[in-house]
Amino acid sequence: MTRGSDDRHVRIYEVGPRDGLQNESTPISTADKLRFIELLADAGLREIEATSFVSPRAIPQLADADELLRTLPRRPGVRYPVLVPNERGLARAEATGVDAIAVFTAATDAFTTHNIGMSVAESLAAFAPVLARAGELGWWRRAYVSTAFGCPYTGRVEPQAAVDVARRLQDLGVDEVCFGDTIGVGVPSQVGELVNLAQGAGIRVSRQAFHFHDTRGTALANVAAGLAAGVRTFDSATGGTGGCPYAPGAAGNLATEDLVYFLDASDWEHGVSLDGVLDAARFIADKLGKPLTTKVGQAGGWDPATGAATGQGD
Ligand code: COA
Ligand code: ZN
């Protein structure tokens, strides 16, 4: 069964500094990344995926991960997970004072082969020692299952395939599995189906997170379906940036500002300030030299007492 409907608290897991920036070709300085992360924490975000300890050749934008983590001021109560693909990445994370990681695989071999040069089974074998060591260190551990709704190389993905991978990751000790709609093809009915199937496989809904891309405009509808099914953790990227360079056609993560507006207006609690997120969104859009094109980034929030738009800066 899902958790009670009186549970009104939602966790917003911010992926802007990692997923948001990894596919951007305009180089962002380490100082600007640090400022972006500070603005996100100022906005009340409490989980901010900071960067990736992957091959700098694979993701040049995040080649400064070691320096970033060495200099990042940690705030009490804020978790700064980093992406780790292998033991080398884990060692880098350990050397820079990390205490939360995310490993990443997918529901399809074609996607993992392009993204990390391994089959799904090989990736699970590679993660086993990484997750075991992180567990010994007492770190928080998340695992992504990308292409949970569809694969850019092989098409439709059966939900059971995503759930099977998620279950194996849970068996490797992760605290949370995150189902990724990497190319933004999923619709609400599929979200409910996946949640229920995962629960049936022994993955409690409190250990499920969802990561939607708004490529085809379905991300918020999918969040609503996740909420109705009992999910309380959703990923988003401030400014709606991002995508995976190894996922052709992937565009735009669900924007944090769009998610926050939606949750506020629907009376979900989350502790994040829309004005603060909009400040951070404008900052990163400016550094990327792009206009802010998210819905709420353009329209602002809305004050029901006056009817006026809010949060549009000076
Ligand atoms: N950190 C830094 N460098 C790393 C590394 C890590 N965690 N792991 C491997 N490398 C380096 C190796 O030293 C080697 O460098 P070289 O070419 O200068 O000799 C190179 O990366 C390739 O290493 P190899 O072990 O042969 O692995 P690979 O080429 O099969 O790459 C990954 C495997 C996982 C390291 C690579 O595909 C990767 O980093 N992918 C990340 C993709 C990503 O982040 N996608 C977005 C998230 S959805
Ligand atoms: Zn994403």
Image (spheres, rainbow, N blue to C red):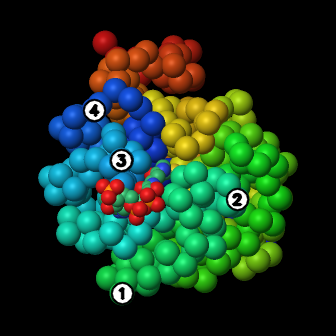
Mark 3, residue position: 57
Give the mark nearest the N terminus, 4 or 1. 4
Q: Is mark 1 within 8 Å of ligand 1?
A: no
Front in this rendered view, residue 60 or 169 = 60
Mark 4, residue position: 28
Q: Nearer the viewer, mark 4 or mark 1?
A: 4
Q: Residue at x 68, y 60 (%)?
A: 109
Q: Nearer the viewer, mark 3 or mark 4?
A: 3
Q: Residue at x 33, y 40 (%)?
A: 61
Residue 263, placed above or below residue 309: below
Left or right, 222 with respect to 8, comes to right
| C-alpha gap between disc 3 and disc 4 | 16 Å
The type of residue carrying mark 1 is Glu
Give the mark nearest the N terminus, 3 or 2. 3
Residue 246, placed above or below residue 109: above
Front in this rendered view, residue 50 or 62 = 62
| C-alpha gap between disc 4 and disc 1 | 34 Å
| C-alpha gap between disc 3 and disc 2 | 23 Å
Label 3: element kind: loop
Mark 1, residue position: 136
